Image (tube, rainbow, N blue to C red):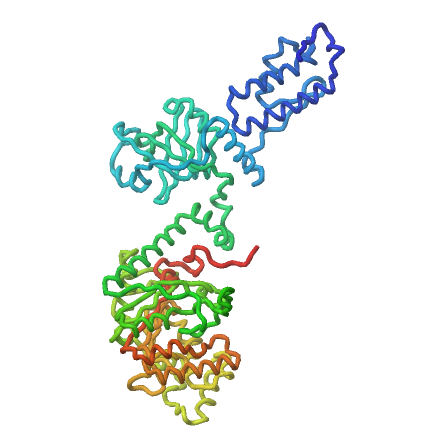
Amino acid sequence: MSSTASGSDVDADVDVAAVEAQIKAKGDEIRTLKEGGISKEDLAPHVAELLALKAKIATPEKGGAAAEPKKEKAAKKGGGGGGKQKQKQPPKKKESDMSETELRQVRLGKADLMKEAGIEPFAYTYDVTHTAAQLRDLYEGKLEGGEEDEDSDVAVAGRIMLRRVFGKLAFFTLQDETGTVQLHLEKGRLGDTFKDLKAWTDSGDIVGVRGTVRRTDKGELSVYAKSWSMLTKSALPLPDKFHGLTDISKRYRNRHLDLIVNPEVRDTFRKRAVITSSLRRQLDGMGFLEIETPVLHAQPGGAEAKPFETYHNTMDMDLTLRIATELHLKRLIVGGFHRVYEVGRIFRNEGISTRHNPEFTSVELYQAYADYEDMMDLTEKLIQGMCESINDSLQIPYGEHTIDLSSPWRRVTMHDIVREQMPEFDFAALDPADPDSIVKARTAASARGVPKVETMNTIGDILNACFEELGEPTLIQPTFVIDYPVEVSPLAKPHRSKPGLTERFELFATGRELANAFSELTDPVDQRVRFEAQAAKRDAGDEEACGVDEEFLGALEQGMPPTGGLGIGIDRLVMLLTNSPSIRDVIAFPLLKPE
């Protein structure tokens, strides 16, 4: 129904209060539609309806029909109430002032509008011709400022990181896996789709753009758009570049956002992938075979660590997640393979720190007819190759240090490292058969602040504790620490010339262990004795001690050739090669407590 006021009074049949309420509701509806990006054509009927409502209570003094242009202008600005109750409407809410819920509603509203217009906001595919990096390389040193390659025809796709709109001109920063490229968008070139571009896109959206390549007057390489497509409408905004994702825990918890807004994080994980690929290529080239071994174990072994426990319903079995791949890989050596390895996930129910994570990646390899000297040479070669796969030099930065990975790496016994830190005491001079020796060792270690030595019952355990507390933090440059006590090396072959020690080494750099290797124990009788000693420690309450693995002992009794074995912690190595301070910086999705 419609009616216009005539004379100086409002039509007596009109309920002014009711019409004013309708005007206000219609004005609110128009504002919502405009925020959702409705086109002028689709908005026009709503504006006309608003004007008709206002006309019902208009008077000549207030403009009547002659005032309709002003009324229409007010409606376009979002005006609502009319008549005597008319009030100034609040300004349109800025995106920066909206809550995440409000932003989500607005963005999903735009997706709905696209669907109503017959446009799919979540595309199925897009034909990309170039990445951002490829365009940079292709046009390096080409095109002057303002010059266009009119013969080019390129299509790029990626996420909108920045929108700058100036009336009939817009510049977007588009990010793909390789970097960023600018999009140059003009109404004169895009036609009617330009208004859709402005109305429907937000930062964070994934779009595809086809056009030519040009440099702006300021020299910025750009894709000069001829067409654009919405590929994925983002329902949530990107975090503020400088304030929205600075909390470390939030970065780890929302790694997908961390990767979007921090290119250096993407670079770290890209380098990690290159490092592990380089490792595999090197080993494959040396004749090693990668063979996968079980993750679920009936008997944990291959390391001293507390396992994660689980249960298999169908088999009615208590199981653990593996703490090492060692014992199964050695059984492959028994079975006749000469060179085997596995890059795999390891699970240890232990503490968390900047260098420890309960789920981590290691490579273990075993080579028949080799010993720990061969493993040292191999370790040096493998790590140098991995370093060179992502760096131009073997001299790399780590924190405040420069680490030199060029050959040769230092080789030093554990006894000598401890003697450097405790020159007043010589563990090598102690007689293990003398009961006073253990007392002397405890006293010397306690005097230097080494913790928990009062609970240790062997000289080897105390020596190892002194090394870990006093010596390990000093090993900044790559160092092979060799000849470990037998008490802490249950799977290593006895040293051929040093009683009480084993042919074992660990590699250290930046004060952290990176690798562990043995001349592998092949004597099944000796191996059983050591397993039983470990089982006794476990029964006494040591949760990290292993038990007796009868299946492995049975394999060992079939005969294993002389074998060198090596394990490298991939996560810590990636930390070193990428100058990352925490292990969580190199694990894509580290385990975190729920918020």
Which of the 4 quarters of the picture holds residue 144?
Answer: top left
In the displayed structure, 47 sits above or below 269; it is: above
Which of the 4 quarters of the picture holds residue 574?
Answer: bottom left
Residue 591's x, y, as percent? 49, 59
Residue 171's x, y, as percent? 40, 32
Q: How many marks?
A: 0
Residue 577's x, y, as percent? 34, 60
Toward the front, the furthest residue is 314
Residue 157's x, y, as percent? 37, 37
In the displayed structure, 153 sits above or below 191; it is: below
Tell me, yes or no, if residue 446 can be seen here: no
- Give the quarter of the figure containing the C terminus: bottom right
Toward the top, the furthest residue is 7
Which of the 4 quarters of the picture holds residue 231?
Answer: top left
- Image check: 298 left or right of 213? right
- In terms of depth relative to the viewer, which is nearer, 579 or 289? 289
- Image check: 120 left or right of 273? right
The residue drawn where x is 70% and y is 18% is 19
Toward the right, the furthest residue is 12
- In terms of depth relative to the viewer, which is nearer, 479 or 324? 324
- Image check: 280 left or right of 196? left
The residue drawn where x is 36% and y is 84% is 526
Tell me, yes or no, if residue 557 can be seen here: yes
